[in-house]
Image (cartoon, rainbow, N blue to C red):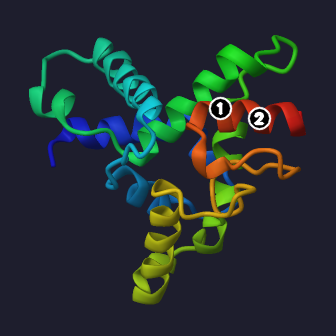
Amino acid sequence: MSYIWLDYFDWLCDIVHANEQTLYWNDILWELYNTNFVVVIKRDNNRVDDAYALRDEFMYGHSGHQSDFLDTPPSLLEVLIALARRGEIEIMHDPELGDRTPKWFWTMLFNLGLDEFAYMGALNDPENDLKMAKIVDNFMYKKHSRDGNGGIFLAKSGQIDMRKEELWNQMCYYFDQFF
């Protein structure tokens, strides 16, 4: 892995203030970074575009052009950060409260239940590694419950099946209910 990938990972972690977390998230974020995002609902290709926009933004500040960097599929980490950022900019922006992109990102990870593995060495245990992989798989392939339990966004009422909605609609519904 070239240095650009490591620098980019650090840059992504800075966006969500990973170094300010009280729990140990580095291994989890690294796993999400090394997991390709899977598009199940066609309109989630918009989230892929948002992830590529993050790469473009990063590359704008760095000299040189790394074609392997720009052409690889986006990671789950990139998609979640890009989604949190777009939600902040387009829906939840409040100048008095400042940028809450990290809040939305960490809310998604807690909703997934990944905090269960947020201690040093948790993912060195093969059983925990398999549990996390199953959580990620259930989320990406929409195997979570109808109300979003097991996904990144929850629904208070049973009016919407979160498994059938693109991530953007899930986020809008979540914000509307909880904020």
Q: Residue 163 in the image: state x and y as whole percent.
A: 60, 51
User: Is 90 rendered above or below residue 137?
Assistant: above
Q: Nearer the viewer, residue 160 or 46?
A: 160
Do the residues bearing badges 2 and 1 touch, measured as CB atoms within 8 Å? yes
Q: CA distance from mark 2 to mark 1?
A: 6 Å
Residue 137 visible = yes
Q: Classify residue 49 as left or right of residue 155.
A: left
User: Residue drawn at (42%, 38%), measured in percent from left and top?
Assistant: 78
Name the image quarter holding the C terminus. Answer: top right
Q: Nearer the viewer, residue 76 or 12?
A: 76
State the residue position of label 1: 169
Q: Secondary structure at mark 2?
A: helix
Q: Classify residue 88 as left or right of residue 125.
A: right
Q: Secondary structure at mark 1?
A: helix
Q: Nearer the viewer, residue 95 or 63?
A: 95
User: Is 97 rendered above or below residue 95?
Assistant: below
Q: Residue 31 in the image: state x and y as whole percent.
A: 39, 60
Residue 102 visible = no
User: Residue drawn at (64%, 73%), measured in percent from left and top?
Assistant: 116
Q: Amino acid at mark 2?
A: Tyr
User: Residue drawn at (33%, 35%), measured in percent from left and top?
Assistant: 8
Q: Nearer the viewer, residue 122 or 163?
A: 163
Q: Residue 149 in the image: state x and y as whole percent.
A: 71, 62
User: Residue drawn at (43%, 71%), measured in percent from left and top?
Assistant: 133
Q: Residue 89 in the image: state x and y as whole percent.
A: 66, 16
Q: Classify residue 53 as left or right of residue 150.
A: left
- Packing grade of label 1 (10 A; few <14, some 14-19, many >=20) is some
State the residue position of label 2: 173
Q: Amino acid at mark 1?
A: Asn
Q: Classify residue 88 as left or right of residue 72.
A: right
Q: Quadrant of the rendered structure where residue 22 is?
A: bottom right
Q: Quadrant of the rendered structure where residue 64 is?
A: top left
